[in-house]
Image (cartoon, grey):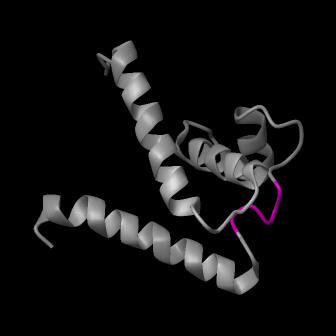
Amino acid sequence: MSYDISYDHLLGWEADLRLLTERVADSLFTRPEPRATFADLVRGLLADVPRKNSWQLAEHVAHGVGLPAGVAAGRGEVGRRALRERVRDYVVAAWAPRTGC
C-alpha cells in the first residue's frame, strides 16, 4: 500500500500534534522540559516502533536514555487522573461529532 503524503500534510500534522500536546499538558507540567518530553512520548506512541517501552520510544525520539518514568504521571495519582481526563475530553470533543455520539 502506498501513501500520497505531501510535505504540507506533514507540517499540518506536526502543528496539530503540537496543539494537542500543549492543550493536554497545559497546566499539568509547569516546566518546559517535562512538556517537551511529554510531546516526545506522544510522538513515540504514534510512531511505527515495534515495541513501545521507554527504551525503544526514547531511542526513536532521540533521547539518550529511557523516557523518564514520571513523564506521564504528572504529580502522582492526581496528575495521572488529570492527564487521563484531559485525553478523554480531547478524544470526545474531537471524535464524538464525527461518529454521532
* Magenta region includes residue 70: yes
State the image coordinates of residue 44 (x, y, percent, origin top left).
62, 43
**Residue lying at 47% horizontally and 32% vertically, measured from the top left:** 14
Q: Most extreme residue toward the right, as rendered?
A: 65
Residue 52 seen in the current view: no
Residue 97 is left or right of residue 63, and the answer is: left
The answer to which quarter of the image holds residue 94 is: bottom left
Q: Classify 36 as above or below 90.
A: above
Residue 89 is left or right of residue 99, and the answer is: right
State the image coordinates of residue 37 (x, y, percent, origin top left).
72, 48
- Please identify the dominant SS of the magenta region: loop
Q: In the picture, which quadrant includes the N terminus? A: top left
The answer to which quarter of the image holds residue 77 is: bottom right
* Magenta region includes residue 79: no
Q: Classify 62 as above or below 32.
A: above
State the image coordinates of residue 73 (x, y, percent, origin top left).
72, 71
Residue 63 seen in the current view: yes
User: Viewer-proximal residue, 12 or 44?
Assistant: 12
Residue 33 is left or right of residue 2, and the answer is: right
Q: In the picture, which quadrant includes the C terminus? A: bottom left
Residue 39 is left or right of residue 101, and the answer is: right
Q: Which residues are magenta?
A: 68-72
Q: Most extreme residue toward the left, as rendered?
A: 100
State the image coordinates of residue 18 (x, y, percent, origin top left).
51, 42
**Residue lying at 62% horizontally and 40% vertically, measured from the top left:** 50
Count of numbered marks: 0
